[in-house]
Amino acid sequence: MSDLKNKRIITVATTGAWPTKKDTPNVPIEPAEIAREIYDCWKAGAAVAHIHCRDDEGRAAMVFEKFEETVRLIRERTDCDIILNITTSGGVNLREEDRLRPFYELKPEMCSYDCGSMNWQHNAVFENNPQFLEKLGLMAQEAGVKPEIEVFDPGMIYNAAYYIKKGILKLPAHFQFCMGVAGGIAATTKNLAFMKDILDETVPGSTWSAFGVGKGAMEIMYAAIAMGGHIRVGMEDNVLYKKGVVADSNVQFVERARRVIEEFTCEVATPAEARQILGLKPRA
């Protein structure tokens, strides 16, 4: 894989659970909007699409039919080989069966695996209890779906190492460092280096990506690329393109990420290359 060391994967998170049309009319909410935006982001250079869906009122939800329609619309575009990564955490206080059904039945190549509970934004508990994490890990293995291990603080890396030791998670592992969320680790270069050091010590050989919410977004993007990691961009994490300027689309974030990667004299990974890097099977 030495020829892939200079490649950087761009993941786009178009929607998330929180931005609304009141925050920005440009956030895609309906399945057709999300599918079209993901397709456009793929054309701009995104290799992975992290998918959230909403209910009919635009609220955070895990409505299976919305995921089913979104995935169908993406897969209908047969020229698009983007890697689909379905969330298992479309909000707080959701039923476990609703969180598990979309990835298990729709069989994307990846799904999120939030490796611990936390106080989310200081106003709610984002619960991922041990029993749920064990069930999620085993169901992902059964479905042939690779977990993207999302960590919001260093302790969650140790949680992941525990589940790897138990066989709940399989190697090679892929981590997403989620930084800057209130209640989790701050989005700074120093903290990213600290998280990477812990990962290298506890789960060596893992691949990783990172993003920063809010003002730390660009710092984390630059630092992750420089440290050999991959990056995530999109309106799930930031609706502002820069201070005081609302992004026109998720494509705008992907295009900037591509420019930054190339300015670092690195190359943007294609979906086929991303599959090699992440240990996924080639597309049939």
Image (tube, rainbow, N blue to C red):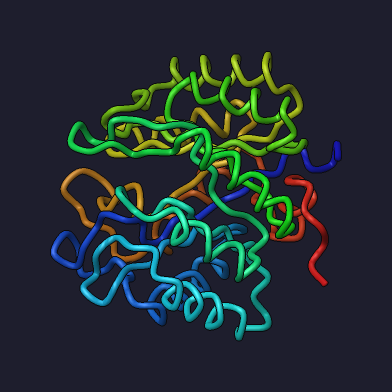
Seen from the viewer's position, the closer of residues 247 and 169 is 169
**Residue 203, percent from left and from top:** 70, 23
Q: Is residue 48 left or right of residue 37?
A: right
Seen from the viewer's position, the closer of residues 191 and 137 is 137
Look at the image and tell me in which quarter the N terminus lies: top right
The quarter holding residue 206 reads top right
Seen from the viewer's position, the closer of residues 144 and 173 is 144
Look at the image and tell me in which quarter the C terminus lies: bottom right
Residue at screen point 51% across, 25% down: 156
Residue at screen point 39% across, 63% down: 62
The quarter holding residue 283 reads bottom right
**Residue 218, percent from left and from top:** 39, 36
Q: Outermost residue, front direction?
A: 131
**Residue 187, percent from left and from top:** 37, 27
Residue at screen point 52% across, 66% down: 102
**Residue 160, percent from left and from top:** 60, 28
Seen from the viewer's position, the closer of residues 193 and 161 is 161
